[in-house]
Image: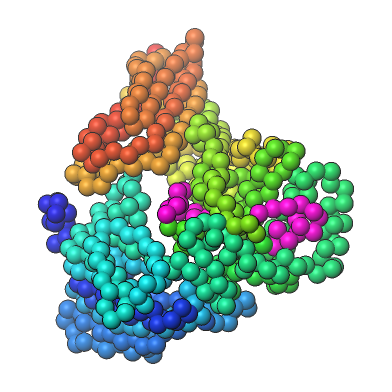
Amino acid sequence: MNLLLAALAVVASAVIEEHTATFTLNSETSGEWSVSTTVVVNDEKGMAAAEFFLYCDSFRTMKSFGGTVTPANGKVVKLRMSDLERDAYSPGLVDDGVTYGYSPSGHFPLTVHYEYKVAYRGGFSSFPAFFPVETAEVSLREASYVLDVPAGYAVKYVSARTEFAKETVKNRDVYRWTVKDFSPLVRESMMPPSEELLPYVYCSPESINLGGFPGMQRDWNELGKWLYSLQTNSLELSPEEVKAVRELTAGCQTTLEKLSRLYDYLRERTRYVSIQLGIGGLKPIPAKEVSRVGYGDCKGLSNYLRALLAAVDVPSDYFIISTSQADLRDEYASVGQMNHAMLAVPVPELSDTVWVECTNPVVPLGYRHEDAAGHQVVLVKESGGELLRIPSYPDSLSLVRQVFEVNLFSSGSAEISARRELFLDYVEGYLTFRDQRPQRQISRLTQNLKIQAEDVQVGAIQDNFADYATLGKAFVPEMQIPYSFRTGSYASVSGDRLFVPVNPYAQAISIQKSARVNDLYQRGVSRWEECVKVQIPMGYRAESIPAPVVLDTEWGSMESQVTLSPGGTEMEVRQTFTIKAFRAPASSYASFRDFARAVNRAYSATAVFVKE
């Protein structure tokens, strides 16, 4: 074991002393999940590891629950089923969903033990997943997962950071995964995704028999056929709605026009509700029902738009996607890899496909958002599942540009006119900006300033979200936010000198002085640009101006240029910073830290002006 990690394990916020989980398959459609776990919580940060949460529905029922909570200076508290909090999952659309929860309390160290059993019925598309450790700063002494099935029953699985063994006992195949002495993850900036670092097991049957719908999932084609079978009779609309949408699109000359009108129709008439409906959360609620109630989950809303488009003779394909993993495990075709559904609409006049997010009405039509662009998806067709990848955008298009015009006074105060320009994925954090309260808008625009902003005024916001003519591969969302403010402390005054920051708007790169534990990981390329023009007070001349900076490393690049106008009355600062995509070992952190410090020095440089 890494010595540094071993040392950290001693001060883990929580220690999972034991975690044993067993799933026993009794028949093709029934089984039992048994779990026993003991957690010692050392501080408040470790409490999440000791919380209990379980979702049940018509396919799974809690059979038993018990446990104990033992605080450091108190007596043992016994837990029963009645101690759990129950909450209906989504009243109105499904009446069999319920969550069970419990949050322990007491003096540290706090020892929590749970034992429970869940009965499964109605069939399976996957078996319970195994994640014995789910968060950072939690260590694990020992854990095991046992899958017990009839001998010869076809099982597929994928696992990481576990020991595996299989044996056949009394006509039963017993699969066993174990983990021992797992040291806690350390939270660090720019670290790899937790699934790359934590132990896990996913397993599922090759044959599906769920809710009376049989199928196979040996590959994506078979899985697609099964998912398509779940959509039988789900596209029907009322005659009145068919008539309404045909009248709505009567004047449309192109597929794109029909799509844009029906997308607006969808977001005006429905809202997204995160629910698990139908067969294991996999069967879309019928389009007619979504229309009636006015809401649905990703499956229901995507299916509803598909029905609307079909009513006006526009074909589309329902597809499933993982918003967290860009690459699917081709050798492990399973619905368990997916957590979202969307719609693909071929548009002949664009010679392209428009990928439609149906759950968020503020997402511009045609924008392949950050959780979809570049991701593999499975189109669900009658002929079977079709695995393909949503096109990603060029890295160069991801950009934040800020422009500032500063009228500086000899007192060090200033009046600033500013504009924030956002492109591609940076727009995503501002999609609801227009509807936010003025104070929230001001906070978003000024939170990283190194100066105190006063009397902030936000101007008219502009975007290209309704520019449907540029959909398809050419569409890149853009937003411009103009604003202005005053400050009493833009420059520091010392005697006859003004110390003027070249860029009080850029956010420094955070770095750590401690030893690095995790690999350095940066998923994609991003760019920031600032242009700052400062009107210098009359009677002042430049005494010192920061030298140009040009950096180009494996981590990224930085250019900084500070110039004066011919008369010396205006200082212009242009800075461009690009962070590259990379994966590097922790041992190279010193190099990254040197790069970050050089960037931060360029951002925090100061020009000096002296009174003549």
Q: Is residue 101 left or right of residue 311?
A: left
Residue at image x 23%, y 41%?
A: 586
Tell me where residue 168 sits by quadrant.
Answer: bottom left
Vertical position of residue 139 compared to residue 472: above or below: below
Q: Nearer the viewer, residue 595 or 547?
A: 595
Residue 544 locus on image (x, y percent): 34, 16
Residue at image x 66%, y 44%?
A: 353
Residue 380 locus on image (x, y percent): 61, 57
Residue 3 locus on image (x, y percent): 12, 52
Colouring scheme applied when the structure was drawn: rainbow
Q: Is residue 161 left or right of residue 339?
A: left
Tell me where residue 198 sits by quadrant.
Answer: bottom left
Q: Nearer the viewer, residue 274 or 214?
A: 214
Range of residues picked out in magenta: 304-331
Number of marks drawn: 0
Vertical position of residue 91 compared to residue 284: above or below: below
Residue 103 locus on image (x, y percent): 34, 77
Vertical position of residue 71 compared to residue 500: above or below: below
Q: Is residue 479 left or right of residue 603?
A: right
Residue 504 visible, this orientation? no
Q: Residue furthest top?
A: 566
